[in-house]
Image (spheres, rainbow, N blue to C red):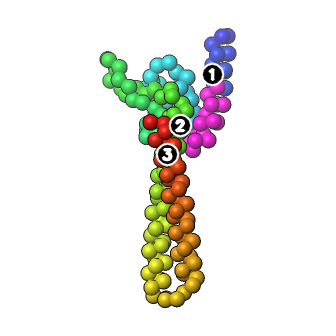
Amino acid sequence: MFEQRNEAITNKIISEFAKTIEMFDLSSSEARLFAFLYLREHPMTLDEMSESLGKSKTSMSTSVRSLLDLNLVTRVWRKGVRKDLYQANTHLFKSFMNASITKWIDATNHQRDSLEELVEKVKSQHSDQQGNKELVAIENQLTLIIEFHQQIEKAFRDMKNEDT
């Protein structure tokens, strides 16, 4: 009786916590797995996760790999256990903010690089069509957009440096 009630409460906590975690751009499977691991007091193997959550081991492996990449889960070692064990990092705010900030920095860098390539294309067309005021205006706007991306990147790098 108590076990069923505790399991129902635990499932509700996992479900609600996972909704919050999904806002950090994690898939529902990743968010649910993280919430599940966060509530566990001991590290778990992929097999244990798979059995507990009713998902395939492959699905668990994919989700754990994503969580490891985001530094939200840690691989741990335990004497006598040959399989990999995983546990959630418990510093929630710092972990999620660092993961989000890193994603923003990477995305901003990628976009800025793409925009800088476009500037080069506009410049080459500009030299072919001297005096084209429309291309000059586009180049000026692109420069402002690149500066915007640089400001975003700097703001996120500053936030990241404040945490360390």
Tell me the amino acid under the disc marked 2: Phe
Residue drawn where x is 53% and y is 39% of the image: 97
**Badge 1 density bin: few <14, some 14–19, many ≥20, Cα 10 Å:** some
Marker disc for residue 103:
none
> Magenta segment: does it hold 17?
yes
- Name the kind of residue labelled 1 in the image: Thr
- Give the vertical position of 59 relative to 49 (above or below): below
Per the image, label 3 sits on a secondary structure element best described as: helix
Tag 2 secondary structure: helix
User: Is residue 87 inside the magenta stretch?
Assistant: no
Examine the residues drawn in magenta and state their main secondary structure.
helix
* Quarter of the image where one finds residue 9: top right
**Residue picked out by circle 3:** 158
Q: Quadrant of the N terminus?
A: top right
**Gap in angstroms between the C-alphas marked 2 and 3:** 16 Å
For marks 3 and 1, the one nearer the N-term is 1
Residue at 64% x, 25% y: name it.
13
Other residues around mark 2 within 10 Å, as few (<14) / some (14–19) / many (≥20) = some
| Of callouts 2 and 3, the N-terminal one | 2
When asked about the image quadrant of residue 86, the answer is: top left
Q: Which residues are magenta?
A: 13-29
Where is residue 115 drawn, in percent x and y? 49, 67
Which residue is denoted by mark 1 in the rendering?
Answer: 10
At 54% across and 70% down in the image, what residue appears?
Answer: 142
Marks 1 and 2, how far apart at CA: 22 Å
Q: Which residue is mark 2?
A: 96
Count of numbered badges drawn on the protein = 3
Looking at the image, is mark 1 or mark 2 nearer the viewer? 2
